Amino acid sequence: MTSGGLLERVREDPLMAELLSKVLVTESRIIITEGGWGIVEEFDFTSEPLRAVLSHSQEVDWLGPSDAPVCHYFAGGAAGHVSAITGEWFEGREVECAATGAARCVFEMTPSGDGKAELVRREMACRLLAMR
Ligand SMILES: [Zn+2]
């Protein structure tokens, strides 16, 4: 799966970065905000690692307060979203979480490795996508 170097084009072309940012703001408002999952304040495809910031997380309301980040659904969804857009496999992790007292929830998405668990995850994702 490949998108022809989308990340490289976004990082090199400010107009492409602005276009993708506007698409993601609109898409996030419709899916995340109106869906009740929180408010995506930032989704930066130019940073390394890629970065997303979420406020008013539904997962924090449901699962917080906590000693550890709780927004696993959003972390996985953000990584899946990046994977779908770029055509490359990414994994996400929450590095700051409002459930632990942070101001907002911050996520980083990085290219995923090729370990056995990752390969099993990819195979499952491909089977799910084939069912569409
Ligand atoms: Zn969180």
Image: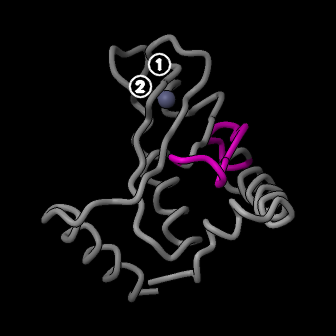
- Residue 15 lies left or right of residue 42; in this view the side is right
Labels 2 & 1 near each other (Cβ < 8 A):
yes
Q: Residue at x 47, y 56 (%)?
A: 79
Towards the viewer: 2 or 127: 2
Q: Residue at x 45, y 45 (%)?
A: 75
x, y percentage for residue 102? Answer: 54, 15
Instruction: For label 1, count other residues whose C-alpha is less than 10 Å away and answer few (under 14), some (14-19) or many (20+).
Output: many
At mark 2, the secondary structure is helix
Residue 129 sits above or below residue 55 on the image? below
Q: Is mark 1 within 8 Å of ligand 1?
A: yes
At mark 1, the secondary structure is helix
Q: Residue at x 86, y 64 (%)?
A: 15
Dot 1 amino acid type: Ala
- Is 20 within the magenta? no
Marker disc for residue 63: 2
x, y percentage for residue 13? Answer: 79, 65
Residue 111 sits above or below residue 72 on the image? below
Where are the magenta residues, as a range? 34-49
Quadrant location of the N terminus? bottom left
> Which residue is labeled 1 in the image?
99
Distance Cα–Cα, label 2 vs label 1: 8 Å
- Is 40 within the magenta? yes
Q: Main secondary structure of the magenta part?
A: loop
Q: Residue at x 25, y 77 (%)?
A: 123
